[in-house]
Amino acid sequence: MTEAQPRQMLADTVCEAIAQRLVDHEIEPGAKLNINTLAQALDVSPTPVREALARLEADGLVVKRALAGYSAAPLMSGRTFEELFEMRLLLEPAAAARAAVRVGEEGLRALTDSLTRMRAAHGDNSRETMRRFLHHDALFHDVIASSGGNSLMADTLRRFRSHTHLYRLYFPVGVPDATCREHERVLDAIRDADPDVAAAAMRTHLHRAQERLLPGLVAAEDEEA
């Protein structure tokens, strides 16, 4: 392993850790980000934190302003939220169709495991339970995208979902059951190697997810008002 490889692995780990704090609202939307404070919290030097923030800026999860440094991105507007789902509806059904004809046994096991863990994350509607549920929700979508064999599509969808998940802690009660049922239909179609049904099931899931997230968008905008 070259010296550059462990450095890159560290940068990837730090980037993932900060991104998780952003989507979990451990770092609130719009909050100022202090490089030294983040480095101390993650037990790393400031260098990988700077690299991570630059990457997260490119993903749109943080913003950098002259003389003010980095801040967490604010929650998107209603119009941008609609545009986000327009893009997901274009790409994710296609990703599901590709996965239906390309997924292997390992991918099917990963999808089944994510769905099982989503179903297990029920009960108390606590913030931590919702975090676990949505972590496996994201993994389910990530496995589908990566199983399609198009790395650019998978990377693009990952960025889109990061923005979607900024709203995830505003989900109304009852979302886990509906989401699991919809994921099961997608998984069944992929397991049956039926690309048309997989695409249709994913499209239905995204339309319903958008409808469920709208109250969260309103709640988030009310908090900012």
Image (cartoon, rainbow, N blue to C red):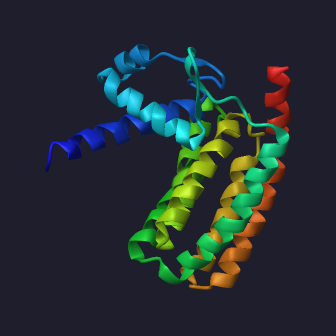
Q: 139 above or below 47? A: below
Q: 81 above or below 204? A: above
Residue drawn 86% across the image and 34% down it = 218
Quarter where residue 72 is shown: top right
Residue 152 placement, left or right of 221: left
Tell me the quarter of the image containing the C terminus.
top right
Residue drawn 54% across the image and 75% down it = 99
Please indicate, yes or no, whether residue 185 appears anywhere in the rendered image: no
Q: Position of residue 180 (x, y in %)?
A: 66, 58
Residue drawn 62% across the image and 19% down it = 31
Judging depth in this view, the residue of 64 and 25 nearest the camera is: 64
Please indicate, yes or no, whether residue 49 appears anywhere in the rendered image: yes
Q: Position of residue 179 (x, y in %)?
A: 70, 56
Residue drawn 29% across the image and 43% down it = 8
Residue 177 placement, left or right of 51: right
Residue 222 placement, left or right of 140: right
Q: Position of residue 131 (x, y in %)?
A: 57, 38
Q: Position of residue 37 (x, y in %)?
A: 42, 14
Judging depth in this view, the residue of 47 and 217 nearest the camera is: 47
Residue 104 placement, left or right of 128: left
Judging depth in this view, the residue of 56 and 192 nearest the camera is: 56
Quarter where residue 178 is shown: bottom right
Q: Count the marks.
A: 0
